[in-house]
Image (cartoon, coloured by chain):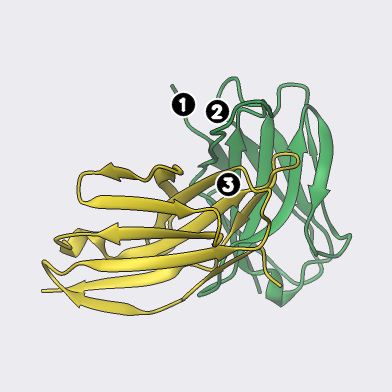
Amino acid sequence: EAGVTQSPTHLIKTRGQQATLRCSPISGHTSVYWYQQALGLGLQFLLWYDEGEERNRGNFPPRFSGRQFPNYSSELNVNALELEDSALYLCASSSGRLRRANEKLFFGSGTQLSVL
Amino acid sequence: RKEVEQDPGPFNVPEGATVAFNCTYSNSASQSFFWYRQDCRKEPKLLMSVYSSGNEDGRFTAQLNRASQYISLLIRDSKLSDSATYLCVVRSGTGNQFYFGTGTSLTVIP
């Protein structure tokens, strides 16, 4: 069974450009989470999608946005890129069934975004 | 106050040592608890879930104290391959929000 897949692996952009990052969850998972991890820092929560809807977002400006498609894959869009947006962007999925007591997160290998 | 707090370390221990990490969480209604392991510039991977009764997986033992709202991870007989950052993760009682600690860095020295 395929795990969480992210593309591209690496992305190089210049300041002011837009970046689009993609994530496919594990088959059967309906929840997708996006995290930002700058070099040497912890994971910062960006966005959570479940069943096609945005359920929560972290403390990031509106130029960070995304969506979830009917097949539960997801896109993260970052507009007007700034140098400090350079980071590893991690996507994770979970089965999204709120009644499961031991719901777990499974991560993709991430997209390394470099803004020059 | 942060949802999950961890001592960032670093912990530098010799091979064969026993090392313990602690983590505290702020929301008493939190439902599920986990330890993840993250190698440098890689994705976090689930190490183990943490149950109220405590649980063990080989050299790793996890404990949960709901009254004090803390979680621990004990690693016995440390191996060089245990060197990584260990992340404490808590799932909220409402919805399906996961909260991550900043991680504790472990280096096992030959």
Q: Residues within 10 Å of mark 3 (few under 14, many from 20)?
A: some
Q: Is residue A86 left or right of residue A82?
A: left
State whether residue B45 appears in this view: yes
For disc 2, the chain is: A
Q: Are marks 3 and 1 in contact (CB under 8 Å)?
A: no
Q: Amino acid under label 2?
A: Ile
Q: Quadrant of residue B51?
A: top left
| Residue under disc 2 on the same chain as residue under disc 1 | yes
Question: Which shade is chain B?
Answer: yellow
For disc 3, the chain is: A
Residue A64: % across, % down? 81, 57
SS category of the residue bearing label 2: loop
First in sequence: mark 2 or mark 1? 1
Query: What residue did someone put label 3 on?
Result: A8
Q: Are marks 2 and 1 in contact (CB under 8 Å)?
A: yes
Query: What residue did someone put label 1 on?
Result: A2
SS category of the residue bearing label 1: loop
Residue A17: % across, % down? 79, 63
As drawn, the label of residue A102 is none
State whether residue A113 appears in this view: no
First in sequence: mark 3 or mark 1? 1
Q: Amino acid under label 3?
A: Pro
Residue B64: % across, % down? 45, 52
Q: Nearer the viewer, mark 3 or mark 1?
A: 1
Q: CA distance from mark 2 to mark 1?
A: 6 Å
